[in-house]
Image (spheres, helix red, strand yellow):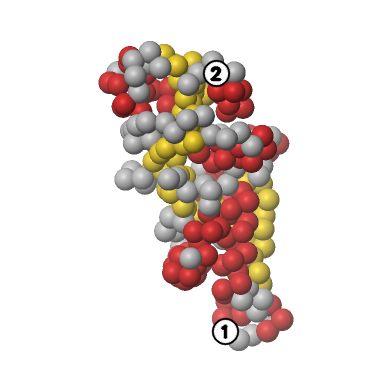
Amino acid sequence: MLLAAAGIAPALASSGPSVCIDRANPLHGVDRALAAAIGRIEGATPRIVSIDTRDGSDALNAKKPRFFAGLVKRCDLVMGFPVETGHPVLPPGVAATRPYLRTGFVIAGATPPPAFSSLKPGTQVGVVYLTVPTTYFSAGPGARLAAHQYSTPASVLAALGRHEVAYALLWQPLLEQALAKNHMPLHQRALRQPHANWSVVALHAPTPAGRAVAHRFDAALARLAKAGTLARLIAPYHTP
């Protein structure tokens, strides 16, 4: 990119930044579309580096504290990283772009769901085991509800289909991914509980070169937002 910026080797001018995208992330389609749209604005095609944290070496390394610090050396940008809105804690050794999507946990049901705090006592609610929503039932409005824990989002949706639970609390990108497969007519509402709302960013190296890539990304993102293109690219993953 430095050579292209200097006007040297024009054959390389169309070469854009390398972008890591995780196939395990339900947002990976959005990440690919966004990277391509930004590439068109910059006139530089990004080089996609596909990783998969579900299995193989990527899955093993993802459990290590400095996994992402290694990724930003492997790629100029690491797409699809969630940070809690209002508490943007990042892994060590990385920096982040501006958010390009806001998502999080939602309450979903066959009928339009009320706010979580307005659910009637005894309401049957499905959650995925060991996820943030499982913490909502020990105190406050959740303590009067009946929580049912399942191993996967698909299991929660199946329980909804059987009317075993009235509502489900799910990570919205996973819900949307599942709905795209089985076309269940569900309604959803963003949760306003602790740790339920998240922003999605791209990670980069905390170096001058990394900050330069991030600056171009943010500038292109602003242009996409102004044109209304960004809203189309991130739908339906943007929480209502």
- The alpha-carbon separation of the residues under discs 2 and 1 comes to 63 Å
User: Could you say whether the residue bearing mark 1 is in a helix, strand or loop?
Assistant: loop
User: Could you say whether the residue bearing mark 2 is in a helix, strand or loop?
Assistant: loop
Q: Mark 1 or mark 2, which is nearer the start of the sequence?
A: 1
Label 2 or label 1, whichever lies nearer to me, is: 2
Relative to 226, residue 75 above or below: above
Question: As drawn, which residue projects farthest toward the front?
Answer: 111
- Which residue is disc 1 drawn over? 6
Q: Quadrant of residue 12?
A: bottom right
Residue at (56, 81) in percent of width and height: 5
Judge the density around disc 1: few (<14), some (14-19), many (≥20) Cα neighbours within 10 Å: few
Q: Position of residue 132 (x, y in %)?
A: 43, 28
Amino acid type assigned to the residue bearing label 2 in the image: His
* 28, 87: nearer the viewer: 28
Amino acid type assigned to the residue bearing label 1 in the image: Ala
Q: Is residue 204 visible?
A: no
Residue at (54, 41) in percent of width and height: 173
For residue 163, the mark is: 2
Relative to 211, residue 56 above or below: above
